[in-house]
Amino acid sequence: MVPDGFAGLPDPAQAGTIADLVERLRLLKVWAGDPSYETIKNLINVTWAGQRRPANELAVRSTVANCFQPGRRRLNTDLVLAVVQALHPDTAYVTRWRQALRVIGGEIEAVSQVRVDGSLPPDLAGFTGRGGELDALCRAARAGDAVVISAIEGMAGVGKTQLAIHAGHLLHREEPFARVLFVNLRGFHPEPDQPPADPAAVLDEFLRLLGVPGHQIPHGLDARAAAYRSRLAGLRALVVLDNAAGLDQVRPLLPDTPGCLALVTSRRSLAGLPGATELAVDVFSPGEAAGFLTAAVGDVPVGSDPDAVARICRRAAFLPLALSLIAGHIRGAAGWTLTDHADRLDERHQARHLDSGVELALDLSYRDQPADRRRLLRLAALHPGQDFDAHAAAALLGPVPGSPVPGGPVSGGPVPGDAVRGGAGVDAVRESLDALCRDHLLQPAGPGRYTFHDLVRTYATGRAHDQDPPPERRAALTRLFDHYLATAAAAMDTLHPAEAGLRPRVPAGTAPGPDVATAGTATGWLDAERRILIAVIAHAATHGWPRHCISMARTLARYLRGGYYADAETAHGYASAAARDTGDVQDQGHALIDLGHTRLMLGRSEPAAACFRQALDLFRAGDDPAGQARALFNLGGAEYRTGNLPAAIELDQRAVALYRQAGDRTGEARVLSNLCIFLKESGRLLEAVDHGAQSLEVARQIGHTWSEALALHSLGEIEVMVHRHESAGDHLRQALALYRGLGDHDGEAGVLDSLGTLYTRTGRPAEALDCHQRSVTIFRRIGARHGEAWALNGLGEAAQAVGRPADAVTHHTAAHTIATEIGDPGQLARAHAGLGHAHQSQARDHYRDALTLYTELGAPEAAGIHARLAAIA
């Protein structure tokens, strides 16, 4: 029964902060009859026990009650969603909470950060044992089944991942797969900042690997899963889902396509996956362990005790990970026999009371490293991302003059604090990282990249907290964040130098960074580090580095617009929250505008406009005319996208006045160019020409090349409409040269589209087709859907002009689809008009739709469409 005063369920989508979400959770509890925390806990555990969660992972009353406490800065996504499901088990409602948590939560957004690979990790050299398991896997694979490798509950380090990788390599050699997809689902990461990966985010990355442009990736989980399975249809593919948290995470990621094989590893039972072969993997048998160790240590003599190998295996608890670590230590101890090593393990166990084979092996391997290498391992474990490169590791170490290079002389004895410091060059750091890989304390994660096994990270993090004082740990992470921010800023300056003034000023890095001096290297670095940079933004926002979070988000804004909209929403959402926490009105306003722009690109015009209005209020409260102008300018863009041209014009006119008041002539030039376009769309052509000329004059007076290019482009478009074709061509070609010189691909594509329109109208359809096609290609590559709709309509008009109506239908139909998805009535009307021209049998219907839209927009094209309808009648 709904309590008095409640018209409906509390809507999590209306929450703007974690505090708002907590308040809505409390309202939901009241709505559901105000059950006790004990009752909610019991309901959750019934569900979780049914999912075969181990007893030590079930909910307790105190943690459930904690979800409802005001003043929280972070939330446990898994538990909050379980609470919501217990209070109102409606799938659609729970999904709304999941989305709200993703937009607002602290570490919650880390679920969206996941690394996927298009190939298997390297096979383990000298892989031995597991004959029975391999036979079972291969039999199932040859039968076309999806295979689940399920470890005994709670057993880590048993070798599930290496078994899956080795099986994958065997099957690939036997009959190569057309595609290979590998992902670590991070089901049991030791750090709360690295929760299990969101399957929707995994599918986003899988689809990119499978060739789907970012802007064409659907937003919903079900739609992504369908697109993923469609892409795999007809292919023989191998999908390795490593370290899964449970059934819900895995189900959407299964290819479910004949000819595809899925290998899934997890610490939990995954009973219930349809058509899966379950395989429980235990520790090595004594014989397998002895065979593995003997093969790994080569010709090391046994010594006086013939039972030495068996003693070592027993002390390692027959765990593959522990045996790998111990083997690495044995190989590095010249002159020792296996008996000596067995004796030392016994001594170490007795001295430190280490009951776990992995803990004993880790402690042994760690203490045998040089002091600088130990410090490198400890600090690398603090990295908030899933993997890292040598430059990041060098930044964590920090430049300390006169210190030995990592990997220097071995220091014996106890390690109370490791006084030796880092400061080596990147090459020396890379050598140390490779050495840690050889000793199995790190794992390769792709060319030049490194990652941790969960158990090793847990151990190394514990050592860092024991040995490195909090100020040193904070200083290391600050250096790391400085490195990423400086390199990101340098990469963005390389790619978009004309927009440097729109980004925060970032000091250059204190140590040599990666090469980002060319467009190729800059884009390559951003693409390789994108997931890490978002993880850094999240960590910085929630652990006390708000300035790094805010600056990084603004620095990456232009890059993330290129189709990485989910990442952009994450980054700017964190930046907005961080700015709110610091009380900086300007930062909060700019973050809201970036967030709003992202939502506008996603076709969510109303939420975007809400961000712009909130930013406008903040800038007004802070008496910041330039900020108000930016908010009005973007709000005008939102109104334009929804077809409200009078409002768009009025907002931009107010923005011009405010930019002039603030003395921001660059902003003034940009808004004048926009006004030029808006006035053109409204049929006020003479005013449009005047504003275009004003914009060009201001841009040239201040010497701002990008604004000049924008003004030339806007003016050229108007001149096409008023039949000043020669002048239009001159202005558009000047704009094209400037945009290309600036490396502005968005601007280049827009001018090519405008040139295509000019060539169509001047009887040069072949040149028009070429320009529009190049424009479509660029817009697709950078993920600009609005521009793509424009260019596709232009391509359709050019095709119609050369007498290819079937091609025209194809292009206008594609433009119609995009314009519908993003809510662009102007391009939707244009698509209908184009379809009317090309589709004689359906012309009347398309012209009527076009006329309705153009009339609602107040666009001058309405008169021409009306005339065509009259002619048909």
Image (cartoon, grey):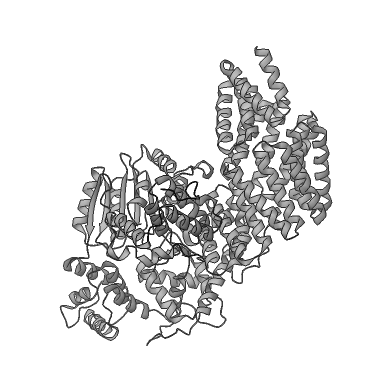
Give me the residue at 47% from left, 77% from top. 406
Identify whether 534 is placed above or below 175.
Answer: below
Identify whether 645 is placed above or below 331.
Answer: above
User: Which residue is the extreme one toward the front?
Assistant: 4
- Can the viewer see residue 39 in this picture? yes
User: Which residue is the extreme one toward the top?
Assistant: 873
Q: How many marks?
A: 0
User: What is the x, y in percent for residue 642?
Assistant: 64, 38
User: What is the x, y in percent for residue 151?
Assistant: 26, 59
User: Which residue is the extreme one toward the bottom?
Assistant: 413
- Left or right: 167 as drawn, with respect to 403: left
Query: Which of the 4 image quarters holds residue 347?
Result: bottom left
User: What is the x, y in percent for residue 433?
Assistant: 44, 70
Give me the residue at 49% from left, 57% from top. 109
Task: Pick whichever, 549 or 170, lies toward us.
Answer: 549
Report the quarter where the C terminus lies. top right
Task: Pick whichever, 686 or 745, lies toward us.
Answer: 686
Query: Which of the 4 image quarters holds residue 126?
Result: bottom left
- Left or right: 734 as drawn, with respect to 398: right
Identify whether 733 is placed above or below 96.
Answer: above
- Can the viewer see residue 799 in this picture? no
User: What is the x, y in percent for residue 438?
Assistant: 36, 69
- Left or right: 830 as drawn, with respect to 653: left
Task: Pick whichever, 156 or 443, lies toward us.
Answer: 156
User: Which residue is the extreme one toward the left?
Assistant: 306
